[in-house]
Image (cartoon, helix red, strand yellow):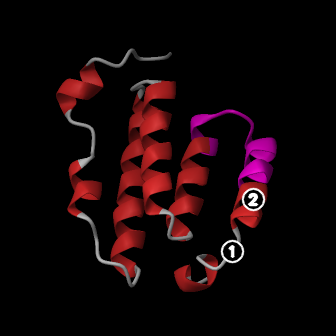
Amino acid sequence: MQPNQLSDISRKGLQLAIQEIREEMFDTPECDYTIAKLLSHCGKFEAAEHHIDEMLLKWGVSPEVTRLTEQAYTDLVTFSADSTESLSSSVISRRPNAEVVSQIPAIA
């Protein structure tokens, strides 16, 4: 689906889609990644960025979570660059730096 078509989804429809993802994937890092990707795909870049930040805080910095977080930021930048809106420099600068990541406890 095209990002422009997806951005027309109502807020309630998006909430229902997120609820279905949570029900299908349970509470996992992959679930949070999928939700962030959906939000990005729908043009909800700030919500996606917030969800990615929450994902990192929630799951820590295990290799899997770090990989998913980086992929989510890449998706966010890709979708926002593809959209008709201009890419905000704050999206790119919000990637967690090593100092911040080192302060988050790893979850085994």
- For mark 1, give the secondary structure: loop
Q: Which mark is residue 91?
A: none
User: In the image, is 39 to the left or to the right of 26?
Assistant: left
Front residue of 84 and 24: 84
Q: Is residue 80 magenta?
A: no
Distance between the alpha carbons at the discs numbered 1 and 2: 10 Å
Who comes first in sequence, dot 1 or dot 2? 1
Badge 1 vs badge 2, beta-carbon distance below 8 Å: yes
What range of the chain is rendered magenta? 18-31
Q: Residues within 10 Å of mark 2 (few under 14, many from 20)?
A: some
Q: Name the amino acid type tagged 1.
A: Ile
User: In the image, is 4 to the left or to the right of 80?
Assistant: right
Give the residue pinned by disc 2. 17
- In the rendering, at what x and y percent does residue 108 appear? 50, 16
> Dividing the picture into quarters, in which one does residue 104 lie?
top left
Front residue of 20 and 12: 12
